[in-house]
């Protein structure tokens, strides 16, 4: 069930909100948990048991870890805690590998087919959001290992933390300790409802009015590369820029919708974006893009590997290794490995001295460099295979006398051009500045009235687009 689907917008969301506002306080968590499990079960047959087993396993293992203090006496006490943590992390990651990477392993290790793995993989569904809730579960267990008092005593609260429907599809990866307080005191709020609804509509508009119309441009260009058709350079550039804008507004739109929904239910979910295309380096980009994932990789992988406390060579290797894992987390394909490697190498080069050079350059130069590096990386992220990715890159720089293919011009509709303009405009942090300017010129109350009027217009335009358009799934929902 997509957050932008009519069944969600007009049936599920109103029903869940109505239930939340009607139920007495002690039953709200149960009501929200029931809604979340129903939402998850809707995603496909056979996936709900996977989520439920994950919840039960991590709850009881977390309780067991929490009962063993960090300063447990003796070597046996410490080794027992480490064994419990290793068991929990290994079980969560093995489940992720089984459901998400089994086909990838079979394709690259043919001897697995002889063990009957191919038939098993064909019958194994990919549970919705498994990458997201697995990383949340691993973080939960590691946090308890570090601070045993973080073990959740309420089964309902942990179950809701993991399965909370606004974030289960595509994040953000919320750490249990950060939202446990809100889950323990679920309370309806008119302010939370109004602000959350406004944020939700903004995200819906990003998805439907900007990301959606840009999708055909990117799809056509990358499809030509996959078919090995003659892809001219202008078409390739238009397609890549369209995809770079599409994935940002698609994913940040989902995050806005998730954060807005969380606010409506009294749960503050973490922010995930901070205008990443305004970055002045690739390192800066990862401080602004998918913040919940990059902070997870930093705290639970990069720092445990030694972080920047090691030798320079080891630090560079750590960066590359972490981003190869980041690529694999996104998908079981060599294209994602290449994408992660691409970013890891840029981060290592910046750490080796390029960042010092960039600091001395004008900010516009840093932005051109960062956006260019990120955009070329999207070729690997979007392409169906490595060969297609290299064909696409070749086409981008293979200028010919044929010029711009007129057939591709049919995809540059007025709506697509308008979406391009809006996307380019709102990649920069203009919205907060416009809001502050309106407050200064009009006063706080008229400015808020204008803001909500614009939000209503965006809602109407989004609903009309959903009614007449072809819905595209959220890109990150498949991860």
Image: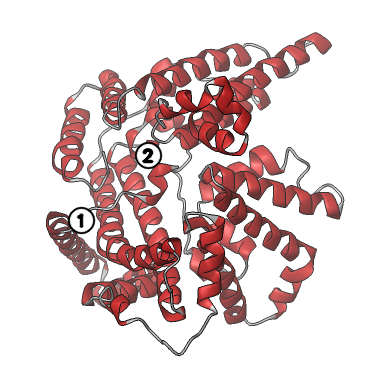
Q: Is residue 294 above or below residue 106?
A: below
Quarter residue 341 falls in: bottom right
What colour scheme does the image use? secondary structure
Please state the horizontal and vertical placement of residue 67, each as a whole percent of the image: 62, 11
For this rendering, which residue is in front, 392 or 323? 392
Quarter residue 343 falls in: bottom right
Structural crowding at the residue carrying mark 2, measured as other residues with C-alpha within 10 Å and reported as few (<14), some (14–19) or many (≥20): many
Residue drawn at point x = 52 percent, y = 21 percent: 116
Quarter that holds the C terminus: top left
Residue drawn at point x = 27 percent, y = 43 percent: 2
Name the outermost residue toward the bottom: 401
Residue drawn at point x = 20 percent, y = 62 percent: 458
Q: CA distance from mark 2 to mark 1?
A: 20 Å
Please state the horizontal and vertical placement of residue 432, each as a whole percent of the image: 38, 67
> Which residue corresponds to mark 2?
169
Apparent side of residue 264 relative to residue 163 in the rendered image (left or right):
left
**Residue 376 seen by the camera:** yes
């Amino acid at each position: 069930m997509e957050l932008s689907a009519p069944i969600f917008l007009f049936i599920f969301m109103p029903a869940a909100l109505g239930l939340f506002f009607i139920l007495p306080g002690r039953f709200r968590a149960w009501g929200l948990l029931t809604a979340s499990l129903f939402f998850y079960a809707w995603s496909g047959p056979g996936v709900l048991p996977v989520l439920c087993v994950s919840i039960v396993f991590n709850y009881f293992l977390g309780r067991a870890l929490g009962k063993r203090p960090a300063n447990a006496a003796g070597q046996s006490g410490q080794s027992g805690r480490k064994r419990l943590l290793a068991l929990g992390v290994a079980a969560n990651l093995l489940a992720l590998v089984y459901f998400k990477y089994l086909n990838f392993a079979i394709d690259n290790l043919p001897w697995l087919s002889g063990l009957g793995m191919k038939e098993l993989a064909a019958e194994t569904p990919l549970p919705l959001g498994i990458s997201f809730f697995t990383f949340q579960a691993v973080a939960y267990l590691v946090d308890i290992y570090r601070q045993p008092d973080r073990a959740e005593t309420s089964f309902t609260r942990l179950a809701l933390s993991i399965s909370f429907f606004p974030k289960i599809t595509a994040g953000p990866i919320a750490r249990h300790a950060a939202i446990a307080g809100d889950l323990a005191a679920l309370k309806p709020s008119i302010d939370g409802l109004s602000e959350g609804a406004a944020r939700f509509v903004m995200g819906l508009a990003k998805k439907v009015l900007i990301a959606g119309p840009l999708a055909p441009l990117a799809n056509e260009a990358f499809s030509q590369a996959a078919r090995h058709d003659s892809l001219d350079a202008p078409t390739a550039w238009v397609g890549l820029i369209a995809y770079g804008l599409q994935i940002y507004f698609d994913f940040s739109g989902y995050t806005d919708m998730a954060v807005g929904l969380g606010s409506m239910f009294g749960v503050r979910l973490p922010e995930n974006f901070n205008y990443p295309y305004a970055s002045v380096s690739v390192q800066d980009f990862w401080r602004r893009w998918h913040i919940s994932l990059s902070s997870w990789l930093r705290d639970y992988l990069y720092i445990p590997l030694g972080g920047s406390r090691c030798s320079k060579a080891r630090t560079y290797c750590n960066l590359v290794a972490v981003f190869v894992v980041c690529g694999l987390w996104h998908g079981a394909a060599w294209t994602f490995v290449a994408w992660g490697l691409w970013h890891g190498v840029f981060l290592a080069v910046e750490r080796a001295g390029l960042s010092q050079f960039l600091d001395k350059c004008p900010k516009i130069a840093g932005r051109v460099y960062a956006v260019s590096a990120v955009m070329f990386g999207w070729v690997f992220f979007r392409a169906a295979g490595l060969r297609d990715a290299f064909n696409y890159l070749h086409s981008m720089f293979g200028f010919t006398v044929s010029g711009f293919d007129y057939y591709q011009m049919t995809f540059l509709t007025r709506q697509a051009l308008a979406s391009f303009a809006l996307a380019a405009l709102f990649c920069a942090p203009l919205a907060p500045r416009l809001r502050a300017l309106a407050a200064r010129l009009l006063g706080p109350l008229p400015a808020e009235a204008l803001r909500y009027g614009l939000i209503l217009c965006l809602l109407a335009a989004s609903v009309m687009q959903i009614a007449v358009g072809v819905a595209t799934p959220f890109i990150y929902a498949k991860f």
